[in-house]
Amino acid sequence: MAEIPADLNAANAALIEQFRAAGRKLDGRPLLLLTTTGRRSGKQYTNPMMFVRLDDRLLVVASAAGAEHDPDWYRNLAADPDVTVEVDGEQYPAAARPAEGADRDALFERIAGQYPFFNDHQAGIERRIPVVELIRRD
């Protein structure tokens, strides 16, 4: 299981700066920035995260490196699915839609086939790791 930095906010801030300045990959994996609205604070929060393109779908996985609880960004978009995505040099509004049932299972299986560490994350916890589609709105 991946180590979560002691100061996650500082690590994310550094990664966001690096993303915007020079690169859009993390350890060879594609990276995007997802901005959600805090479910309690109403503030905007931007999180760097790995994404996967499957067919014509842009997907993120709420694994939180195998943590027992869903990440805050996921709980925020569950409360308010209007998000902003920065990817491939573009920034645009999107709707976040968690996959459900057989669709979620099939997507998770395909993603974990490409990135097996997601299987490790799922195996170590009881919660079912969400897969979220980010649907562009223009």
Image (cartoon, rainbow, N blue to C red):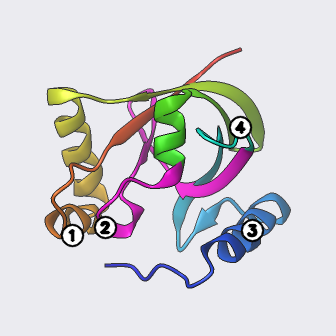
In depth, the one of 64 and 37 nearer the eye is: 37
The disc at residue 120 is 1
Residue holding disc 3: 13
The disc at residue 66 is 2
Q: Are marks 4 and 1 in contact (CB under 8 Å)?
A: no
Which percent across, then down, holds residue 69?
A: 34, 58
Whether residue 35 sits left or right of residue 97 in the image: it is: right
Label 4 or label 1, whichever comes before in sequence order: 4
How far apart are the two marked residues, 1 and 2, measured between alpha carbons? 8 Å
Q: Residue at x 24, y 45 (%)?
A: 108
> In the image, which is nearer the foreground, mark 4 or mark 1?
4
How far apart are the two marked residues, 3 and 4, measured between alpha carbons? 19 Å
The disc at residue 42 is 4
Above or below: residue 82 compared with residue 7: above
Q: Are marks 1 and 2 in contact (CB under 8 Å)?
A: yes
Farthest residue to the right: give it. 21
Name the kind of residue labelled 1 in the image.
Asp
Name the kind of residue labelled 3 in the image.
Ala
Q: Picture quarter containing residue 85?
A: top right
